[in-house]
Amino acid sequence: MIEALMDVRGVRHTALVASDGRVVARAGLSEEQLNAELTLVAASRAVIGSLQANLNTGHWQELLLDLDGGPVLFTPHGDQILLTAFDEVASLGRVRFAVRRLLGTA
């Protein structure tokens, strides 16, 4: 399923991570990269949880982190999070469209 995101220009890797931290699917990631990305997913869950509590909201659309290694988009999919790492923020529109189409929300 998520392998299709690798065809989108600029996407470096992607992973679908369950709420318990288990990797459901991945594409373009080595084991070494995967461990770093799982740390990012855990941190993003904490940030999202904190924002939801402080803003008194239960739903979130996506979270974008612009890191030294390039931007990473976190998108909810049920109780899972789809992580999509890509080359530059200028590619965000293309990546968002592809993610939404993949998840059936476009």
Image (tube, rainbow, N blue to C red):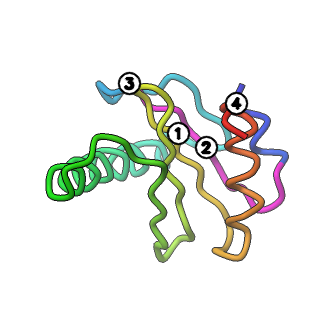
21 in the magenta segment: no
Q: CA distance from mark 3 to mark 4?
A: 22 Å
Instruction: State the image coordinates of residue 32 (x, y, percent, origin top left).
Output: 46, 46
13 in the magenta segment: yes
Please report whichever mark, 3 or 4, sits nearer to the chain's N-terminal start.
3
Of the numbered discs in the image, which one, if any, rests on residue 4? none
Q: Mark 1 sits on what residue?
A: 82
Of the numbered discs in the image, which one, if any, rests on residue 22? 3
Q: CA distance from mark 1 to mark 3?
A: 12 Å
Judge the density around disc 1: few (<14), some (14-19), many (≥20) Cα neighbours within 10 Å: many
Judge the density around disc 3: few (<14), some (14-19), many (≥20) Cα neighbours within 10 Å: few
Asked if residue 36 lies left or right of residue 50, the reply is right
Amino acid at pointer 2? Thr
Q: Mark 4 sits on what residue?
A: 104
Q: Which residues are magenta?
A: 8-18
Please report whichever mark, 1 or 4, sits nearer to the chain's N-terminal start.
1
Q: Residue at x 77, y 60 (%)?
A: 94
Q: CA distance from mark 1 to mark 2?
A: 7 Å
Amino acid at pointer 3? Arg
Secondary structure at numbered mark 4: loop
Secondary structure at numbered mark 3: loop
Q: Residue at x 51, y 45 (%)?
A: 75
Amino acid at pointer 1? Leu
Of the 4 image quadrants, the one containing the C terminus is top right
Magenta-highlighted stretch: main secondary structure? strand
Labelled pair 1, 2 in contact (Cβ < 8 Å): yes
Q: Is 81 located above or below residue 1 in the figure?
A: below
Q: Name which quarter of the figure residue 51 lies in.
A: bottom left
